[in-house]
Image (tube, rainbow, N blue to C red):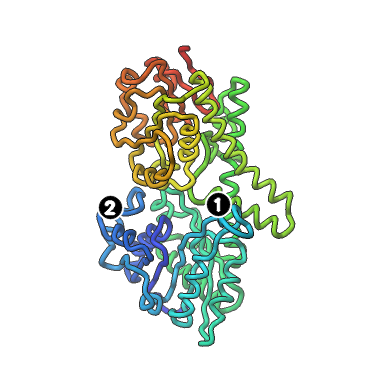
Amino acid sequence: MSQREVKEILCLGAGYVGGPTMAVIAEKCENINVTVVDLNQDRINAWNSDQLPVYEPGLQDMVERRRGKNLHFKLASPELLAQADIIFVSVNTPTKTYGQGSGRAADLRFWELAARDILKHARSGTIIVEKSTVPVKTAEAISRILHSGTEGKKFSVLSNPEFLAEGTAIQDLLSPDRVLIGNEPGADGEAAGEALANIYRQWVPSERVLLTNVWSSELSKLVANAFLAQRVSSINSVSALCEATGADVSEISKAIGMDSRIGPKFLQAGVGFGGSCFKKDILNLSYICETFGLTDVASYWRSVVDMNDYQMSRFVQRIVETQFNTVAGKKQTVLGFAFKPDTNDTRETPAFNVTLKLLEEKAKVVIHDPEALENAKWDLKDIEGDLSFEEDVYRACEGAHSLILLTHWKEYQNLDFKRIFDSMEKPAFVFDGRLWLDAAKLHDIGFNVIGIGSREMMHI
């Protein structure tokens, strides 16, 4: 197919990866018709509206430019599978919650269902692209399913993991550090890899398009996320030591980040990492190591997740202890519920765990977020306790005993904190879980300021 023009691309899954990725391909490859499908009618309706289900800077404008031209959002159908030259599979691969590997292994049942639909309805010769994050050797298993039919169909399976950071996904797609494509051995696999590479080469420099074997590609995604999460857990472990010794973790981050061997990225201490990938992928990597008998390696990677859990628990413990060892009946205002700014994604957000622990302490919790409030309501719909949600940030802060910043949205830096201080109960506390606010300025206003890994600035 590398010698044949690709005219039709189909993406199974209209989520945080599939939607933005296909929007960029449609933007940069006007000669290709791109269709994104999903089983959820509400999600498809949202993609066809002016209120997309995924918030990413620049995404709305791009979708509106291409939608109805060479970008389409539809319900999944056999006809669309039959006409595709390339099928991207971007379905959910959550951590298993049942059976063997529960809590660690990836749940691939949605991937397998997709593969069986492809076998039934797609044409022979169609290129199948793993876009979901999957365990190493998944392509091999999927290939066996795709070639298990009696019709004699042939498919090439590629691994093309995404390396997107939510909040900057569009820019990451437009100017990626690298595009990784893993292909199966043999002429057909290599030809399929080149066909996909030629699509990306329409806007990505050739030297950034890397072709590897499919197993290296699958494992690279897990390892990349594990390394990034490891850096976060490492600096968070240092933040605990800083609080015990009087050192400042921000100063340490700056000092070690200036070392060219280390670099500054992912060295910002905080309440913990979140999102759909880090925890899931590390647990999956740990499980894979364990299945190959590498128990010490598995334990090493599991410790990254353990440190992240410890950081969240430690943060809540500090909130309670600072407020005279009780938050029962006290209004605690959570600023930010998304796991990071510039996204409405709340999957594995530290704010969820912090909220649960505060409710267990009988606190009155009010949540504000500029973009993720509806997702927060959904995530917490079955949680008991004195919990409410507020769209107006100043109303959310009225009468609060403390402000707990969990997402470093830019607008939180520009709030009228004098107005907020005057409306709060005294003493008024600020717990900065992202070291995002001007602690000295807040202290001058009258706040007691407690930041991760930094000196407390207290009036009491």
In the image, residue 381 sits, relative to residue 6, either above or below, namely above
Residue lying at 26% horizontally and 67% vertically, measured from the top left: 69
Return the residue nearer the eye: 60 or 114: 114
Residue 278 in sight from this viewpoint: yes
In the image, residue 288 sits, relative to residue 416, either above or below, namely below
Q: Which mark is residue 375?
A: none
Q: Which residue is mark 1?
A: 280
Q: Secondary structure at mark 1?
A: helix
Q: Which residue is mark 2?
A: 51
Estimate the x, y position of residue 378 in percent, counting from the top left. 38, 47
Q: CA distance from mark 2 to mark 1?
A: 28 Å
Disc 2 and disc 1 in contact, CB within 8 angstroms: no
Residue lying at 52% horizontally and 51% vertically, measured from the top left: 277
Disc with the residue nearer the chain's start (2 vs 1): 2
Residue 207 in sight from this viewpoint: no
Estimate the x, y position of residue 382 in percent, counting from the top left. 42, 45
* Residue placed furthest toward the bottom: 151
